[in-house]
Image: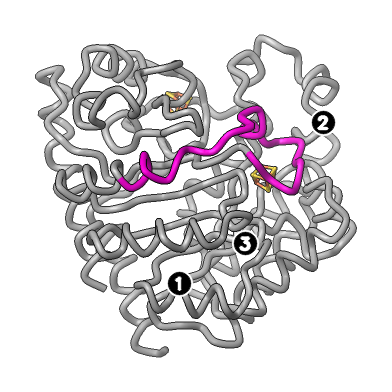
């Protein structure tokens, strides 16, 4: 609980100092979280995954040193994302245990592999945290196809079932589908799976990470040829229906759907390519991504430097990153990768309230 509070406080404080950072052109905040793409190795080969090009894993000692640096710096949240971290379960548990001991709020994403009762008990024993399980459909056919793996659905479902059976008080589970042309009709079904197991739910919109597509340099009808998962024009009514059903569920089952209503509605405009991004992208002031080879990066702006060669704090305050932040502030790409998801202080407080309510209910 203390770590969640620390994260929320840091986020609110970060919100306050952002304007000053932008005005002075000097980053006065520390990141709210660090995303470590620990490895590119995975047993699945999802067509939308970009991390698989790295066939390596960040060495244990480098990760432990990074955790120590983050703890000393006071960065509150530490996320490990794919490849599949649970393919290296014992080493991964030691990393999570260390991060928890150092006071970081741990979070990781998994496709469900090896997420069994023994692992969950161990994770809870070493302090717990937050877990995201990817589930792209409520049927085997859809999820297996989306994940390009026969048996992916059972694996994800088993993970969710495992959580449902024991639901440790210090572990929060979120079920997250990537919304694409292939699973528009199954969002409600995935929501139900999450709800029944006491998990949270949030939708991530498919992102081809391709500026040309979203900046409308490619004609709409051409997109599907290049990116088959992009929602096709004939499916726009189904897209709308699907989002509206989640908006309703958000009202009838408060506290489960994490996307804001605005974010959900933006997904319709996004796929129809009518979304314009008029805000300022603040991601550069909140997060930093570490790749499996140790290099750090921000969105699509290339290498900032390696944590194997420089302390993370130095990278965060480097001139290179400061230049990238300026570019990011000017970005007009209508993406939904967090920039549009910036939460206000009110939203943080209401999320905190919902969280407490869930914890008290058990
Ligand atoms: S399960 Fe995750 S890490 Fe593995 S291939 Fe799919 S998206 Fe990539
Ligand atoms: S809005 Fe931000 S996160 Fe999105 S593409 Fe632009 S710089 Fe990247």
Mark 1 = which residue?
A: 123
Badge 2 or badge 3: first in the primary sequence: 2
Picture coordinates of residue 291 (x, y %)? 48, 31
Looking at the rendered structure, which numbered label has been put on residue 246? Answer: 3
Magenta highlight range: 41-64
Badge 3 or badge 1: first in the primary sequence: 1
Can residue 252 be seen here? The reply is: no
Which of the 4 image quarters holds residue 28?
top left
Neighbor class of circle 3 (other Cα within 10 Å; few <14, some 14-19, many 20+) is: many
Q: Looking at the image, is 182 positioned above or below residue 299?
A: below
Mark 2 = which residue?
A: 228
Point 49% across, 28% down: residue? 293
Q: Secondary structure at mark 3?
A: helix
Residue 50 is left or right of residue 43, and the answer is: left
Badge 1 or badge 2: first in the primary sequence: 1
Q: Secondary structure at mark 2?
A: loop
Residue 95 is left or right of residue 72, and the answer is: right
CA distance for labels 3 and 1? 31 Å
Point 66% across, 9% down: residue? 217
CA distance for labels 2 and 3? 24 Å
Point 15% across, 44% down: residue? 73
Principal secondary structure, stretch drawn in magenta = loop
Q: Are marks 2 and 3 in contact (CB under 8 Å)?
A: no
């Amino acid at each position: 609980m203390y770590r969640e509070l620390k994260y929320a406080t840091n986020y609110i404080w970060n919100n306050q100092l952002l304007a000053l950072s932008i005005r002075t052109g000097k980053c006065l905040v520390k990141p709210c979280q660090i995303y470590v793409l620990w490895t590119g190795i995975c047993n699945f080969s999802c067509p939308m995954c970009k991390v698989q090009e790295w066939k390596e894993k960040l060495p244990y000692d480098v990760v432990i040193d990074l955790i120590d640096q983050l703890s000393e710096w006071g960065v509150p949240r530490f996320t490990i994302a794919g490849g599949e971290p649970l393919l290296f379960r014992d080493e991964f548990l030691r990393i999570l245990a260390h991060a928890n001991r150092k006071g970081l709020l741990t979070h990781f994403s998994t496709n469900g592999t090896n997420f069994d009762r023994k692992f969950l008990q161990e994770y809870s024993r070493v302090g717990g945290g937050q877990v995201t399980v990817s589930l792209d459909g409520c049927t085997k056919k859809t999820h297996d196809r989306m994940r390009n793996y026969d048996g992916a659905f059972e694996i994800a479902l088993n993970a969710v079932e495992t959580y449902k059976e024991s639901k440790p008080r210090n572990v929060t589970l979120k079920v997250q589908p990537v919304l694409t042309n292939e699973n528009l009709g199954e969002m409600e079904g995935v929501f139900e799976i999450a709800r029944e197991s006491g998990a949270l739910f949030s939708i991530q919109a498919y992102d081809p990470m391709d500026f040309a597509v979203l900046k409308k340099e490619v004609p709409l009808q051409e997109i599907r040829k290049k990116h088959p998962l992009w929602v096709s024009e004939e499916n726009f009514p189904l897209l709308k229906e699907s989002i509206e059903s989640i908006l309703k569920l958000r009202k009838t089952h408060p506290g489960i759907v994490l996307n804001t209503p605005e974010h959900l509605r933006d997904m319709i405009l996004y796929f129809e390519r009518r979304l314009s991004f008029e805000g300022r992208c603040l991601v550069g002031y909140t997060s930093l991504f570490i790749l499996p080879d140790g290099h750090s990066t921000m969105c699509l702006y290339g290498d900032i430097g390696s944590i194997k060669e420089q302390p993370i704090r130095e990278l965060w305050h480097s001139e290179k990153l400061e230049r990238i932040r300026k570019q990011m502030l000017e970005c007009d790409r209508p993406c939904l990768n967090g920039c549009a998801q910036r939460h206000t202080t009110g939203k943080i407080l209401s999320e905190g309230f919902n969280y407490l309510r869930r914890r008290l209910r058990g």
